[in-house]
C-alpha cells in the first residue's frame, strides 16, 4: 500500500491496483476501489473523471511503472541482481498479504475484454509486460546473452514469475517462487557466462 | 467446449470452466455459468445442489484432471513430448478463443478467498497444479533429471506456461507461449541428457 506522504491521486492508484490484484477488475466497483484506497468516492471521480475504466488503466500503468523503476535500478548491477529484486518484490507482496494479493497486471490480463474493443486497462497490461521484458532483454544482452536468445529468456522470467505468484496464492505457500528462483538464477548464470567488457 | 455426446453433467462442468477462465469466478453468477454451458438453471442446480461454489470447485477439478490425463498420456513418450502436448493444449485454448479464454485453474487462484476460509475451488486449483507438477517431476526423474532438481523444473514449466497464457491474452499474440516453449525445450533437453534405460 501507499507510503505516508504519497499524494492523494497516487494513493488512489496504489490502493486500486492492490484491490484489482486481490479481486480482479470485473468483480470490483469503483466504490470498492475508492474504499480500499481510503479515498472518498467524490475525490476519486475528481481525479479520474473517466470512472472505473480510467482508474483501472492508470492503476495498472502505475503498478507497471513502479515495477519497471525497481527493475531498471537493480538491473544496473546485472541480470542476476535484477532477477533477485524482481522476485523479492513479488515475494513481499504475496507474503505480506498472507497470499491474498498478487499482480494487478496479470489480474486484468485474464479477464475477457468486451466484444466491442480492448479496454485501456488491458492495453496498459500488455505495455507493462513488454516494458519489463525489454529491460530484462537489454540487461541480458549487455551481459553476454545472445541477442536472439535474450528476449525469449526475458519472456520466460516474466511469465514464470507471474505464474508462480498465482501458484503461491493457490497453494498458500512461497515454495513456487523459491523453486523458479533457483531455476532462473541458474539459467541466467549460464546465459551470461561471458560478460561484455565496457 | 464439450464434444457432442458428452453427458449433461460433464457438459456443464466444461462450460463453467471455460466461463471461469474468461471472466473469473467472483464476477460470474451460477446463472451465467449455466447459460454459457447451454444448460437450464434447474438442471444445473439438480446436478450441483451446493450451487456456484460446488459447480466452480468441480469445474476446476474437472479441468485439472483433463489436463492431467493428456499430460500423463503424452509423458509416456518422455518429458519433451509431454511439454509439447502441454503447450499445444494451452495454445489451442488461447488461439481458438481469439485470446479470450485461458486457464480456469489460474483464474480462481488469483481471486482473494473470503476472510472465513478457503473456498473449495481454490483448494481444487492447488491440487490441480500439484498434480501436473507431480506428473512432470516423475517423467523428468525417470529420464535422467536429478531428483533434487526435477520438482523445481516441473514448477518452472507449470508456472511459466500459466504466466505465458496470461501474457498472450494481454498482448493478443501467441509469441509468449512460443518464446517459453523454446526455452523450456532446451532446458528439459539439457536436464535429461542421460536417460535411464529400463
Image: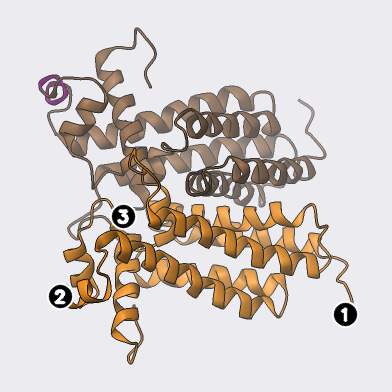
Chain colours: A orange, B brown
Residue name at image x 30 percent, y 19 percent: B10
Corner quadrant of residue B63: top left
Residue farthest bottom in this picture: A5
Q: Quadrant of the C terminus of chain A?
A: bottom right
- In the orientation shown, which residue stands out farthest toward the left? B42
Q: Please provide percent x and percent y for residue A28.
A: 23, 57
| SS of the residue under disc 2 | helix
Please tell me which residue is depicted at 29% across the width and 30% down the height of the picture: B16
Foreground tag (3 vs 2): 2
Residue at image mark 3: A24
- Left/right placement of residue B103 relative to residue B10 reads right
Q: Would you place residue B20 above or below residue A45 in this image?
A: above
Instruction: State which chain disc 1 sits on.
Output: A
Task: Report, in whole angstroms, how far the alpha carbon at label 3 lies from the one at label 2.
Answer: 23 Å
Are the residues tagged 1 and 3 within 8 Å (C-beta)?
no
Q: Quadrant of residue A9?
A: bottom left
Q: Position of residue B93 (x, y in %)?
A: 48, 31
Disc marking residue A42: 2
Per the image, is B43 magenta?
yes
Q: Quadrant of the N terminus of chain A?
A: bottom left
Determine the chain carrying the residue at label 2: A
Q: Residues within 10 Å of mark 2 (few under 14, many from 20)?
A: few
Give the alpha-carbon distance from disc 1 to disc 3, as whole Å.
45 Å
Tell me if residue B183 comes above or below residue A35 in the rendering. above
Amino acid at each position: 500500500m501507499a507510503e505516508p506522504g504519497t499524494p492523494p491521486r497516487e494513493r488512489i492508484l496504489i490502493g486500486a491496483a492492490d484491490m484489482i490484484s486481490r479481486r480482479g477488475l470485473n468483480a470490483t466497483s469503483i466504490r470498492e476501489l475508492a474504499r480500499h484506497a481510503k479515498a472518498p468516492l467524490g475525490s476519486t471521480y475528481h481525479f479520474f473523471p473517466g470512472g472505473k475504466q480510467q482508474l483501472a488503466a492508470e492503476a495498472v500503468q502505475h503498478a507497471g511503472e513502479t515495477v519497471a523503476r525497481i527493475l531498471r535500478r537493480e538491473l544496473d548491477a546485472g541480470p542476476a541482481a535484477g532477477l533477485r529484486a524482481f522476485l523479492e518484490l513479488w515475494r513481499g507482496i504475496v507474503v505480506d498479504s498472507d497470499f491474498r494479493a498478487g499482480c494487478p497486471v496479470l489480474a486484468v490480463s485474464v479477464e475477457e475484454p468486451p466484444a466491442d474493443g480492448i479496454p485501456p486497462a488491458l492495453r496498459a497490461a500488455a505495455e507493462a509486460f513488454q516494458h519489463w521484458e525489454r529491460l530484462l532483454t537489454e540487461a541480458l544482452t549487455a551481459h553476454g546473452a545472445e541477442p536472439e536468445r535474450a528476449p525469449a529468456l526475458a519472456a520466460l522470467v516474466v511469465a514464470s514469475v507471474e505464474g508462480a505468484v498465482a501458484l503461491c496464492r493457490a497453494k498458500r505457500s512461497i515454495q513456487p517462487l523459491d523453486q523458479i528462483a533457483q531455476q532462473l538464477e541458474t539459467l541466467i548464470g549460464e546465459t551470461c557466462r561471458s560478460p561484455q567488457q565496457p
